[in-house]
Image: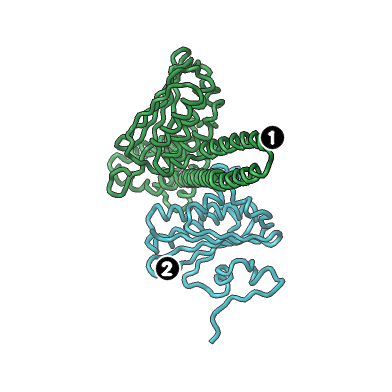
Chain colours: A cyan, B green
């Protein structure tokens, strides 16, 4: 039997609408995770819904209230970016495990203009809020894993993971 | 640095209303409002103490409205409080990260300096030694007058060797790595005395070794301070005291020179090459102060907390 592998078509930047640089993400789209929760994000009320779903999952996985707050904050910042800069997108919540502890996975995806210079966007001071250590760099610091991939004209995908302490 | 502003009545009202919404309706919308409030307040340059004040004000108002269930009110406000503070948590983590990066950078610079210093000492020293041998070789085959001219070349070489040794030592004395801070300070003091005629006294526990990062920064500070005394103080004597206490190490450099006017101290401190040292100190959690008055000499003091070992003793 062939080992499971994610294959990329050459010269097609997206597989299933996803940048090829993120195999974990392609996996999210191809192999539906159990308990996967999807929330479309277009407006401020969707931010509330996304936070609510994400927080509920965090609580279900046994996260402390502090950890659940950090999850909600990450969702806020990622969803806010979608509403402000991409107009619409979606957030996906699911969980995995390292064998002992549960890991909450948040995927924020949009089909906006994309970010031309991701490295710059990840630096404090890129945006007015980033200056204070919030925004995308702030999310990275609150979470245990952070991946971002963006293609100009196609969109941005951010995947973050929070491990239960 | 940007000044932090204080809590305004308008903000106080918004906090009280948001907490009230959280307590009466609950739900994610109220928590998002709490988060947004905290974030706004951070944006408006209100410090974490300001947020604490606002939160407490809102909590007092909420409890006054529910005199019979204050404990439950405080309990229910918990997630609201966390939300308000989470943007400060992000900011706090960014400062910690920056501090770690600064420490890493200092370590990198120190490693580079050490490498260059050792290369100057060992490699360049070796090359010079072979030039001496070659010159001796040539001198044997030359008539006397030419050999005398070679001697003047050797005099220049002596100066170069001396200069290389001094440069290497100034960059990073090997003795600091091998024998520690106190021995390195002794050598430094001897050198300064020899060059300037200053009377330099070094006091401290000689057998103790401190963590390398602390020894390095203390050495650099004393080096810089002695430089300044030599340049500006017109002093005749300097006393250096290194004292190890239970939780910290302190170092004092006092001279009997002309001092300076504390009114212009700020610009003086900036002007005397202590900027890099302040940053390096900050990354170790240390502090530096300079006391001076015209005619009263200058007194520089440094304190650095010692890292705790797992046993609770200092190492």
Q: Is residue B94 above or below residue A13?
A: above
Image label count = 2
**What's the chain of the residue with tag 2?**
A
Q: Is residue A83 visible?
A: yes
Q: Which residue, as the protein is rendered here, is positioned at the far top?
A: B295
Q: Which residue, as the protein is rendered here, is positioned at the far bottom?
A: A1
Query: Element at badge 2?
Result: loop
Query: Element at badge 1?
Result: helix
**What's the chain of the residue with tag 1?**
B
Q: Position of residue B87 (x, y in %)?
A: 49, 45
Q: Which residue is mark 1?
A: B145
Q: Position of residue B199 (x, y in %)?
A: 43, 22
Quadrant assignment, res A118: bottom right
Does residue B149 appear left or right of residue B239 in this picture?
right
Closest to the observer, A58 or B151? B151
Q: Which residue is mark 2?
A: A98
């Amino acid at each position: 039997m062939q080992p499971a592998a994610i294959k990329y078509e050459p010269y097609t930047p997206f597989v299933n609408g996803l940048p090829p640089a993120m195999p974990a993400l392609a996996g999210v789209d191809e192999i539906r995770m159990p308990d996967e929760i999807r929330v479309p994000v277009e407006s401020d009320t969707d931010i509330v819904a996304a936070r609510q779903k994400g927080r509920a999952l965090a609580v279900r996985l046994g996260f402390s209230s502090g950890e659940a707050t950090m999850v909600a904050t990450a969702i806020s910042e990622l969803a806010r970016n979608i509403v402000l800069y991409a107009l619409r997108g979606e957030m996906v919540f699911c969980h995995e495990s390292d064998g002992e502890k549960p890991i909450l996975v948040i995927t924020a995806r949009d089909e906006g203009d994309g970010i031309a210079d991701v490295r710059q966007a990840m630096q404090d001071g890129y945006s007015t809020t980033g200056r204070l250590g919030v925004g995308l760099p702030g999310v990275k610091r609150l979470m245990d894993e952070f991946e971002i991939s963006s293609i100009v004209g196609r969109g941005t995908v951010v995947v973050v993971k929070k491990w239960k302490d | 640095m940007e000044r932090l502003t204080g809590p305004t009545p308008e903000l106080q009202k918004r906090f009280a209303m948001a907490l009230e919404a959280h307590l009466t309706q609950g739900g994610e919308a109220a928590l998002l409002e709490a988060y947004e409030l905290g974030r706004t307040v951070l944006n408006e340059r209100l410090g974490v103490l300001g947020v604490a004040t606002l939160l407490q004000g809102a909590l007092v108002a909420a409890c006054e409205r529910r005199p019979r269930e204050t404990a439950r009110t405080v309990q229910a406000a918990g997630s609201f409080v966390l939300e308000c503070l989470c943007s400060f948590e992000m900011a706090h983590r960014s400062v910690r990260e920056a501090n770690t990066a600064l420490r890493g950078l200092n370590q990198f610079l120190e490693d580079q300096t050490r490498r260059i210093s050792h290369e100057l000492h060992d490699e360049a020293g070796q090359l010079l030694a072979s030039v001496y041998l070659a010159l001796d070789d040539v001198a044997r085959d030359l008539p006397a007058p030419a050999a005398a001219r070679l001697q003047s070349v050797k005099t220049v070489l002596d100066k170069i060797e001396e200069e290389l040794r001094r440069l290497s030592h100034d960059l990073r004395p090997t003795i600091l790595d091998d024998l520690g801070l106190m021995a390195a300070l002794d050598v430094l003091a001897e050198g300064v005395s020899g060059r300037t005629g200053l009377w330099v006294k070094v006091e401290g526990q000689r057998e103790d070794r401190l963590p390398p990062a602390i020894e390095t920064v203390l050495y650099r500070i004393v080096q810089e301070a002695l430089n300044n005394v030599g340049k500006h103080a017109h002093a005749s004597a300097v006393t250096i005291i290194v004292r190890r206490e239970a939780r910290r190490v302190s170092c004092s450099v006092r001279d009997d020179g002309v001092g300076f006017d504390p009114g212009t101290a700020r610009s003086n401190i900036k002007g005397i090459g202590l900027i890099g040292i302040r940053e390096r100190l900050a990354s170790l959690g240390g502090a530096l102060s300079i006391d001076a008055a015209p005619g009263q000499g200058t007194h520089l003091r440094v304190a650095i907390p010692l890292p705790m070992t797992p046993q609770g003793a200092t190492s």
